[in-house]
Image: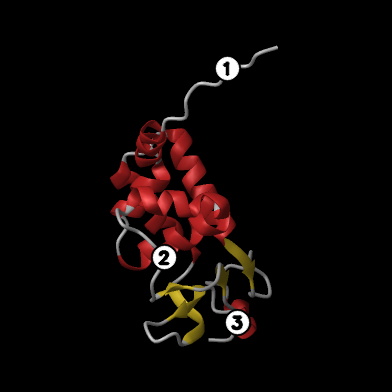
């Protein structure tokens, strides 16, 4: 039995990648948000990152410093942190990126709003952001920080 395959069209694939929320998020995010989006995408789409970056950024060869060297973590004070690799290759562990998880969520929502994402893309983007935060070092993440008893449990 003869099987015929359609010719592989690299240009059509690149165009689909350019239209994806992942590519658009990389192109429109700025500052810390860009570093977080890049790290979150690498965390969720490790195998596809090289292709995504080559389509998004013409002439891309490799990621250069500075960049985030870990997934996100919530520290004991409730800040969203990650390891930062500097231009000189120094690694600074657990550097605060957002004041709390609400600030992180709001930053990702604002990016989704700027990109005018569909509901499906928005859900997927925020799920990727949520998966990027891999651990929570607070003793009780559900504790209300306004509760006076919470102050004695959280190291500032």
User: Could you say which is closer to the camera, residue 96 or residue 32?
Assistant: 32
Which disc, if any, is residue 18? none
- SS under mark 2: loop
User: Could you say which is closer to the camera, residue 141 or residue 110?
Assistant: 110
The mark lying in front, picked from 3 and 2, is: 2
Residue drawn at (42%, 47%) of the image? 22
Residue drawn at (64%, 75%) of the image? 137
Residue 55: x and y, percent? 36, 47
Q: Is residue 42 left or right of residue 33?
A: right
Label 1, on which residue? 4
- SS under mark 3: loop
**Of the image marks 1 and 3, the number of the one nearer the N terminus:** 1
Residue 25: x and y, percent? 36, 50
> What separation in Å lies between label 1 and label 2 (alpha carbons)?
36 Å
Which disc, if any, is residue 62? 2
Which disc, if any, is residue 154? 3
Residue drawn at (36%, 34%) of the image? 11
Residue 136: x and y, percent? 63, 69
> What separation in Å lies between label 1 and label 3 (alpha carbons)?
63 Å
Residue drawn at (44%, 85%) of the image? 89
User: Could you say which is closer to the camera, residue 122 or residue 57?
Assistant: 57
User: Could you say which is closer to the camera, residue 70 or residue 47?
Assistant: 47
Residue 9: x and y, percent? 42, 30
Direction right: furthest residue: 1
**Of the image marks 3 and 2, the number of the one nearer the N terminus:** 2
Rendered image quadrant of residue 149: bottom right
């Amino acid at each position: 039995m003869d099987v015929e395959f359609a010719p592989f069209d690299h240009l059509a694939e690149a165009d689909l990648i350019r239209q994806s929320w992942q590519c658009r998020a990389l192109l429109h995010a700025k500052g810390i948000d860009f570093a977080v989006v890049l790290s979150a995408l690498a965390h969720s789409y490790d195998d596809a990152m090289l292709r995504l970056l080559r389509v998004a950024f013409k002439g891309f060869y490799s990621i250069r410093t500075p960049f985030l060297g870990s997934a996100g973590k919530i520290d004991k004070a409730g800040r969203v942190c990650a390891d930062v690799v500097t231009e000189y290759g120094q690694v600074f562990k657990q550097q605060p990126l957002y004041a709390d998880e609400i600030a992180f969520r709001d930053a990702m929502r604002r990016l989704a709003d700027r990109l005018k994402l569909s509901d499906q893309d928005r859900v997927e983007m925020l799920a990727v952001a949520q998966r990027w935060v891999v651990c929570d070092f607070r003793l009780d993440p559900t504790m209300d920080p306004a509760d006076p008893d919470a102050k004695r449990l959280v190291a500032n």
